Amino acid sequence: DTRGVAVMDSTHDGIPTGIGVLRYTCDQGRNWLPIGLPTFDLNAMTEYERTTTDLMLVAVGTAGTVVRVIMQNDTVGIIPMSGASTDLDLTAVWAARPGDDLRCLVGSFNGTTNDAEVLGTANLADGQQASWTASGQISTVPIIALTGTEISNVIYAVALDGGKRSDMSLDLTGPAFTHYESTDNSTLVVQVTAGVATLYDPTNAEFHQVTLSGTTPFTSSPPVTSGGTGPAAAPSALIAVSSTDLWSVDAEGELFKASDAYPYTWMDRSDKVRPLP
């Protein structure tokens, strides 16, 4: 696929401003074009649907901003949604559309009260006011990563604040949140299959997997060290293409690929990266 959408740091006279703006490409990243409103300051984005012609995402940002991004072939558009309170910064997002309704979870942070919580809605629909259910405070610092899965009208989710993992479920028939205890201090999480997430723990430099749902949700597989030839450094991002195709990127731009399913063996693929012409 030659198309893509990203949240990038804007610049002024070549100097980063710290403001997150939307950009899209139709030529494999050779050129990135602006999209969105000049008032957007976005923090995170997630893809919830992809076909041969369509790419659909949800992005969130400051002042309670929630926006859908829809790319059809080489045409891209945005749909501002009914977000959360303008007092909140939205710092992480997960979305899925198992049927007609667009499920969505966002990590919210109130800088005045230092209150971080997860907000969930059963349907982030066009032209409708979303009804958000709050988890209650789970941290005093912003949520940096969030993932989930839905089973039988219940969303099971993992939220990370950079020092603590919070497990929770949102029963959409209530709606109501339930919390589960966790002492994990992972900083990265990625969903590798429906109901299974891989996390990275930087303190112990190891990966482990968490089952998000089932009769005993949030049970963890034994942690495993990176193994193989890497990653040589702590990853700054994890990308799951499939359950057996996981990629790690570190702060130096080194690229590693997991050659098999969990527990992983890593292969250095940094030498395969080539600058765009």
Image (cartoon, rainbow, N blue to C red):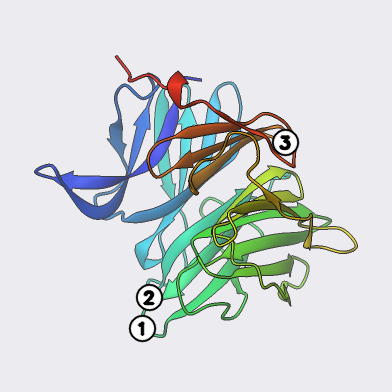
Asked if the residue under mark 1 is in contact with the one under mark 3, i.e. CB atoms within 8 Å, the reply is no
Secondary element type, mark 2: loop
Residue at figure coordinates x 39%, y 55% from the top left: 43
Residue at figure coordinates x 18%, y 45% from the top left: 11
Q: Spatial distance from mark 1 to mark 2, Cα to Cα?
A: 9 Å
Question: Considering only order in the chain, which callout, 1 or 3, is on the residue closer to the N terminus?
Answer: 1
Query: Residue 100, percent across and down?
Result: 69, 45
Name the side, left or right, on which 195 lies relative to 29.
right
Name the side, left or right, on which 100 lies relative to 25.
right
Name the side, left or right, on which 232 lies relative to 220.
left
Secondary element type, mark 1: loop
* Residue position for label 1: 112
Query: Residue 276, percent across and down?
Result: 33, 18
Visible residue check, residue 199 = no
Q: Quadrant of the C terminus?
A: top left
Residue at figure coordinates x 60%, y 64% from the top left: 159
Q: Spatial distance from mark 2 to mark 3, Cα to Cα?
A: 38 Å
Q: Which mark is residue 87?
A: 2
Visible residue check, residue 160 = yes
Question: Considering only order in the chain, which callout, 3 or 2, is on the residue closer to the N terminus?
Answer: 2
Q: Marks 2 and 3: which is nearer the front?
A: 3
Question: Which residue type does callout 2 highlight?
Answer: Asp
Classed neighbour count for the residue bearing mark 3: other residues with Cα under 10 Å, few (<14), some (14–19), many (≥20): some
Query: Residue 144, percent across and down?
Result: 49, 61
Q: Residue 243 carries which label?
A: 3
Residue 180: quadrant of the picture: bottom right
Residue at figure coordinates x 30%, y 30% from the top left: 32
Classed neighbour count for the residue bearing mark 1: other residues with Cα under 10 Å, few (<14), some (14–19), many (≥20): few
